[in-house]
Amino acid sequence: MKRIVVVGASAAGLAAAETLRREGYEGTITLIGEEPHHPYDRPPLSKQILGGQWEADRVALRAPADLDALGLELRLGTAATGLDLAGRTVELADGARVPYDGLVIATGVRPRRLPGDDGGRAHVLRTLDDALALRDRLGSGRRLVVVGAGFLGAEAAAAARGLGMEVTLLEPAPVPLAPAVGEPVGRMLAEVHHDHGVALRTGVTVTEVADGGVRLADGTLVEADEVLVSIGSVPNTDWLKGSGLTVGDGLECDEYSAAAPGVYGAGDVARWHNPLFGTAMRIEHRTNATEQGMAVARNLLRPDQRRPFAPVPYFWSDQYDLRIQAHGRLRGHEEIAVVEGALEERKFLAAYRCGDRVAGVLAVGMPPRTVRTWRQAVATRAAWRDAVGELVPEGA
């Protein structure tokens, strides 16, 4: 291969480019990014950037000199608009066509929006520009409504409360984050927000963004000075329509993260078969983006030595003084057991069961050694009875 194109200039794309160089690839690497910025880190956007602790330059993933040393052909500020799989070219919004011998697709996701939001009535939080625009509107005594109490919405609510704002957090589910972490942990996190002065309203559906706030299904207007919509995301695969690649909930890939010969997916956009858990996954977490970007670069360079991408997924969230960490697969769990600490103390480790195996763990305020031990139980697919024993399931 003489020319590799990486579409997506964030964590996954940069990890792929760096790994290609580290593995000895000396050909051309073209890194294409829709945003004008050099690759930057997204997790601090809803935490340090929104809370005002960091300025924009701190989220850069690499210093300019380090990027220069990679010898990349940068195409920033220009979106990919099409892919000619047979002709092995990527089409760009500016009309250019970039040829490739190998291709990494790492185009990420975009936020979902609500009716009535014309781009000026409400904020979303995906890009650096999104975070800076919202931060400029935050301040003590102002009112913020956050639609969606997932991890991103909850982190933004916590950051806004730290700035002295009045925050209302709206969530359609009876218990926030229950599908992701289970009802017992979701209830605990709801109590944390209540204790910090957030007006958390569950079981309510927002139908539209309106003048002065958001409208609920019953017609009620929830007033706000600013609105943040955090209701999930959509994989950026529109540019792949008609290419011949299979897209559904993301770019469909096999266990090697390959979507076609010489074409790989990485990061939030990729849905691949994880052989460790025996199921397809699409993961929108920072650590997975980096690990998958590295894995696909190696598989692309050495097709005769490819390895399945079989990670233990990991994510973390900072809310107020809590550091939440999770390893493994929590969604779809059949049982939760608190194996260390206690929920009411907000210092605990909970194990999650799928079938007869430990599928995941979630820790709040626990020492690293304890977390590592239970991560190993997930990685080895430990039997639930052997790891947890006869503990009473949480919420039973």
Image: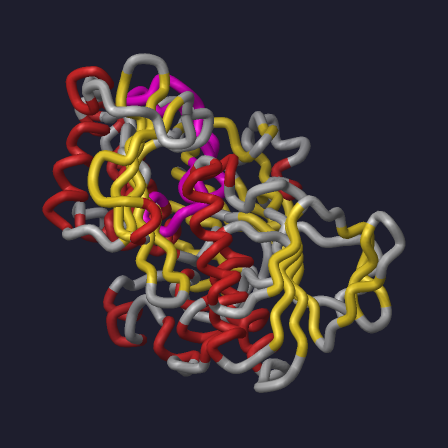
180 up-or-down from 224: above or below: above
178 up-or-down from 96: above or below: above
Residue that appears at 60% across and 47% down? 232
Instruction: Specify start and end residues of the magenta stretch as a single range.
Output: 265-288
Q: Is residue 126 left or right of residue 25?
A: right
19 up-or-down from 50: above or below: above
164 up-or-down from 394: above or below: below
Quarter where residue 44 is shown: bottom left
In percent of width and height, residue 206 lies at 76, 52
Question: Front-most of 139 and 111?
Answer: 139
Question: Front-most of 122 and 308?
Answer: 122
Residue that appears at 42% across and 31% down? 395
Looking at the image, the residue that sits furthest to the left is: 369
In percent of width and height, residue 113 lies at 72, 54
Q: Is residue 317 left or right of residue 389?
A: right
Residue that appears at 56% across and 42% down? 175
Residue 103 in sight in this render? no
